Amino acid sequence: LLAELQHRVRNTLAVVRSITRRTAETSETVEDYAMHLEGRIDAFARAQAMATRAPDTGVDLEEFIREELLALAVRDEEKARLDGPPVRLRSRTADSIGLAIHELATNALKYGALSGDGGHIDVTWQIEGTDGDRRLRLEWRESGVGVAGIAPRRRGFGSELIERSLRYELDAETELQFTPGGIRCLIEI
Protein backbone atom coordinates (compact mmCIF):
# COMPACT_ATOMS: atom_id res chain seq x y z
CA LEU A 1 0.00 0.00 0.00
CA LEU A 2 2.82 2.38 0.85
CA ALA A 3 4.61 1.61 -2.43
CA GLU A 4 1.39 2.28 -4.39
CA LEU A 5 0.85 5.56 -2.53
CA GLN A 6 4.43 6.65 -3.25
CA HIS A 7 3.98 5.76 -6.92
CA ARG A 8 0.77 7.79 -7.18
CA VAL A 9 2.27 10.78 -5.38
CA ARG A 10 5.30 10.75 -7.71
CA ASN A 11 3.00 10.60 -10.76
CA THR A 12 0.84 13.43 -9.42
CA LEU A 13 3.87 15.61 -8.74
CA ALA A 14 5.20 14.89 -12.23
CA VAL A 15 1.92 16.06 -13.77
CA VAL A 16 1.85 19.21 -11.60
CA ARG A 17 5.49 19.92 -12.47
CA SER A 18 4.70 19.54 -16.18
CA ILE A 19 1.63 21.79 -15.93
CA THR A 20 3.67 24.40 -14.07
CA ARG A 21 6.52 24.36 -16.59
CA ARG A 22 4.29 24.43 -19.67
CA THR A 23 2.13 27.19 -18.21
CA ALA A 24 5.24 29.29 -17.56
CA GLU A 25 6.41 28.77 -21.15
CA THR A 26 3.12 30.02 -22.63
CA SER A 27 2.26 32.84 -20.21
CA GLU A 28 3.00 36.47 -21.00
CA THR A 29 2.54 37.99 -17.53
CA VAL A 30 2.67 36.84 -13.92
CA GLU A 31 -1.09 37.41 -13.61
CA ASP A 32 -1.71 35.33 -16.74
CA TYR A 33 0.54 32.58 -15.35
CA ALA A 34 -1.23 32.54 -11.97
CA MET A 35 -4.71 32.47 -13.49
CA HIS A 36 -3.93 29.68 -15.97
CA LEU A 37 -1.96 27.63 -13.47
CA GLU A 38 -4.80 27.73 -10.96
CA GLY A 39 -7.37 26.69 -13.57
CA ARG A 40 -5.22 23.81 -14.82
CA ILE A 41 -4.45 22.51 -11.34
CA ASP A 42 -8.16 22.75 -10.48
CA ALA A 43 -9.02 20.72 -13.60
CA PHE A 44 -6.42 18.11 -12.65
CA ALA A 45 -7.83 18.02 -9.10
CA ARG A 46 -11.36 17.45 -10.45
CA ALA A 47 -10.05 14.53 -12.52
CA GLN A 48 -8.31 13.07 -9.47
CA ALA A 49 -11.42 13.47 -7.31
CA MET A 50 -13.59 11.69 -9.86
CA ALA A 51 -11.04 8.90 -10.30
CA THR A 52 -10.85 8.23 -6.56
CA ARG A 53 -14.64 8.11 -6.10
CA ALA A 54 -14.75 4.73 -7.82
CA PRO A 55 -11.17 3.66 -8.56
CA ASP A 56 -12.18 0.21 -9.81
CA THR A 57 -14.78 1.41 -12.33
CA GLY A 58 -13.05 4.46 -13.83
CA VAL A 59 -14.34 7.94 -14.61
CA ASP A 60 -17.64 8.47 -16.42
CA LEU A 61 -16.84 10.56 -19.52
CA GLU A 62 -20.15 12.46 -19.69
CA GLU A 63 -20.10 13.37 -16.00
CA PHE A 64 -16.47 14.38 -16.38
CA ILE A 65 -17.14 16.79 -19.27
CA ARG A 66 -20.26 18.14 -17.57
CA GLU A 67 -18.26 18.87 -14.38
CA GLU A 68 -15.66 20.80 -16.37
CA LEU A 69 -18.34 22.89 -18.07
CA LEU A 70 -20.07 23.50 -14.74
CA ALA A 71 -16.76 24.75 -13.31
CA LEU A 72 -16.98 27.49 -15.96
CA ALA A 73 -20.65 28.19 -15.15
CA VAL A 74 -22.06 26.50 -18.28
CA ARG A 75 -25.30 25.09 -16.93
CA ASP A 76 -27.76 25.03 -19.78
CA GLU A 77 -28.30 22.92 -22.86
CA GLU A 78 -28.62 26.09 -24.95
CA LYS A 79 -24.85 26.64 -24.71
CA ALA A 80 -23.56 23.06 -24.69
CA ARG A 81 -24.86 19.66 -25.75
CA LEU A 82 -23.21 16.37 -24.75
CA ASP A 83 -24.02 13.16 -26.55
CA GLY A 84 -22.49 9.70 -26.57
CA PRO A 85 -22.71 6.21 -25.12
CA PRO A 86 -21.63 5.39 -21.57
CA VAL A 87 -17.82 5.40 -21.41
CA ARG A 88 -15.55 4.90 -18.40
CA LEU A 89 -12.00 6.22 -18.55
CA ARG A 90 -9.00 4.96 -16.64
CA SER A 91 -7.53 7.48 -14.20
CA ARG A 92 -4.45 8.27 -16.31
CA THR A 93 -6.56 8.75 -19.43
CA ALA A 94 -9.03 10.92 -17.50
CA ASP A 95 -6.20 13.17 -16.30
CA SER A 96 -5.04 13.90 -19.84
CA ILE A 97 -8.50 14.16 -21.40
CA GLY A 98 -9.61 16.36 -18.49
CA LEU A 99 -6.83 18.86 -19.13
CA ALA A 100 -7.69 18.91 -22.85
CA ILE A 101 -11.39 19.52 -22.11
CA HIS A 102 -10.40 22.24 -19.62
CA GLU A 103 -8.28 23.98 -22.27
CA LEU A 104 -11.04 23.77 -24.88
CA ALA A 105 -13.66 25.06 -22.43
CA THR A 106 -11.44 27.88 -21.15
CA ASN A 107 -10.63 29.02 -24.68
CA ALA A 108 -14.33 28.82 -25.59
CA LEU A 109 -15.08 31.09 -22.64
CA LYS A 110 -12.39 33.61 -23.58
CA TYR A 111 -12.53 33.60 -27.38
CA GLY A 112 -15.07 31.10 -28.66
CA ALA A 113 -18.60 29.81 -28.32
CA LEU A 114 -18.99 30.74 -24.65
CA SER A 115 -17.70 34.30 -25.07
CA GLY A 116 -20.92 35.64 -26.61
CA ASP A 117 -24.62 35.00 -26.84
CA GLY A 118 -24.78 33.19 -30.17
CA GLY A 119 -22.21 30.46 -29.60
CA HIS A 120 -22.81 26.78 -28.96
CA ILE A 121 -20.67 23.73 -28.15
CA ASP A 122 -21.44 20.17 -29.21
CA VAL A 123 -19.38 17.45 -27.57
CA THR A 124 -20.01 14.02 -29.02
CA TRP A 125 -18.27 10.70 -28.64
CA GLN A 126 -18.57 7.16 -29.86
CA ILE A 127 -16.77 3.86 -29.64
CA GLU A 128 -15.48 2.53 -32.93
CA GLY A 129 -13.98 -0.84 -33.76
CA THR A 130 -14.30 -4.29 -32.25
CA ASP A 131 -13.31 -5.61 -28.83
CA GLY A 132 -9.64 -6.11 -29.68
CA ASP A 133 -9.27 -2.74 -31.41
CA ARG A 134 -11.73 -0.33 -29.81
CA ARG A 135 -11.17 3.40 -30.03
CA LEU A 136 -12.91 6.32 -28.41
CA ARG A 137 -13.63 9.13 -30.89
CA LEU A 138 -14.36 12.40 -29.06
CA GLU A 139 -15.30 15.55 -30.96
CA TRP A 140 -15.58 19.09 -29.59
CA ARG A 141 -17.26 21.43 -32.07
CA GLU A 142 -18.03 25.10 -31.52
CA SER A 143 -20.42 27.09 -33.69
CA GLY A 144 -21.79 30.61 -33.78
CA VAL A 145 -18.44 32.27 -33.05
CA GLY A 146 -18.04 35.64 -34.76
CA VAL A 147 -14.37 35.31 -35.71
CA ALA A 148 -12.48 34.31 -38.82
CA GLY A 149 -11.40 30.69 -39.07
CA ILE A 150 -7.70 31.29 -38.58
CA ALA A 151 -5.34 29.76 -36.05
CA PRO A 152 -4.06 31.93 -33.20
CA ARG A 153 -0.79 33.81 -33.71
CA ARG A 154 1.02 31.69 -31.13
CA ARG A 155 0.73 28.11 -29.96
CA GLY A 156 -0.50 27.97 -26.40
CA PHE A 157 -0.63 25.31 -23.72
CA GLY A 158 -3.93 23.90 -25.02
CA SER A 159 -2.72 23.42 -28.60
CA GLU A 160 0.51 21.87 -27.34
CA LEU A 161 -1.41 19.53 -25.04
CA ILE A 162 -3.88 18.42 -27.71
CA GLU A 163 -1.51 18.17 -30.65
CA ARG A 164 1.55 16.74 -28.91
CA SER A 165 1.03 15.58 -25.34
CA LEU A 166 -2.08 13.48 -25.96
CA ARG A 167 -0.33 11.78 -28.85
CA TYR A 168 2.66 10.96 -26.65
CA GLU A 169 0.86 10.09 -23.40
CA LEU A 170 -2.17 8.21 -24.79
CA ASP A 171 -1.09 7.29 -28.31
CA ALA A 172 -4.00 9.47 -29.42
CA GLU A 173 -4.73 10.79 -32.87
CA THR A 174 -5.74 14.43 -32.69
CA GLU A 175 -6.91 17.12 -35.04
CA LEU A 176 -7.41 20.77 -34.14
CA GLN A 177 -9.12 22.99 -36.73
CA PHE A 178 -9.93 26.67 -36.57
CA THR A 179 -12.94 27.04 -38.86
CA PRO A 180 -15.14 30.00 -39.74
CA GLY A 181 -17.61 30.24 -36.90
CA GLY A 182 -15.74 28.11 -34.35
CA ILE A 183 -13.19 25.48 -33.46
CA ARG A 184 -13.28 21.74 -34.05
CA CYS A 185 -11.18 19.30 -32.05
CA LEU A 186 -11.10 15.59 -32.67
CA ILE A 187 -9.40 13.18 -30.24
CA GLU A 188 -9.20 9.44 -30.86
CA ILE A 189 -7.77 7.11 -28.22
Image (tube, rainbow, N blue to C red):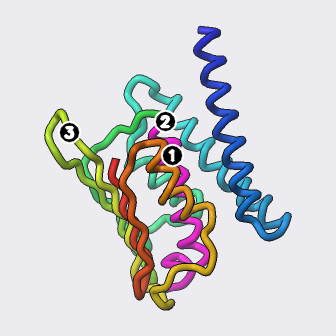
Q: Main secondary structure of the magenta part?
A: helix
Label 1: how many Cα within 10 Å (few below 14, some 14–19, many 20+): many
**Looking at the picture, how far across and down is residue 134, in whole percent?**
22, 41
Q: Which residues are magenta?
A: 92-118
| Spatial CA span between label 3 and label 2 | 19 Å
Q: Three-letter amino acid code at disc 2?
A: Arg
The structure residue drawn at horizontal position 67% and vertical position 26%, both measured from the top left corner, is: 10
- Disc 1 is placed on an element classified as helix
The residue pinned by badge 1 equals 96
The residue pinned by badge 3 equals 133
- Disc 2 is placed on an element classified as helix
Marks 3 and 2 in Cβ contact (< 8 Å):
no
User: Compared with residue 144, is residue 94 higher up or lower down, i.e. above or below?
Assistant: above
Q: Which quarter of the figure has residue 123?
A: bottom left
Is 35 left or right of 126, judged from the image as shown?
right
Q: Three-letter amino acid code at disc 1?
A: Ser
| Spatial CA span between label 3 and label 1 | 21 Å
The residue pinned by badge 2 equals 92
Marks 1 and 2 in Cβ contact (< 8 Å):
yes
The structure residue drawn at horizontal position 50% and vertical position 52%, both measured from the top left corner, is: 67
**Looking at the picture, how far across and down is residue 179, in whole percent?**
40, 82
On the question of residue 27 being in view, the answer is: yes
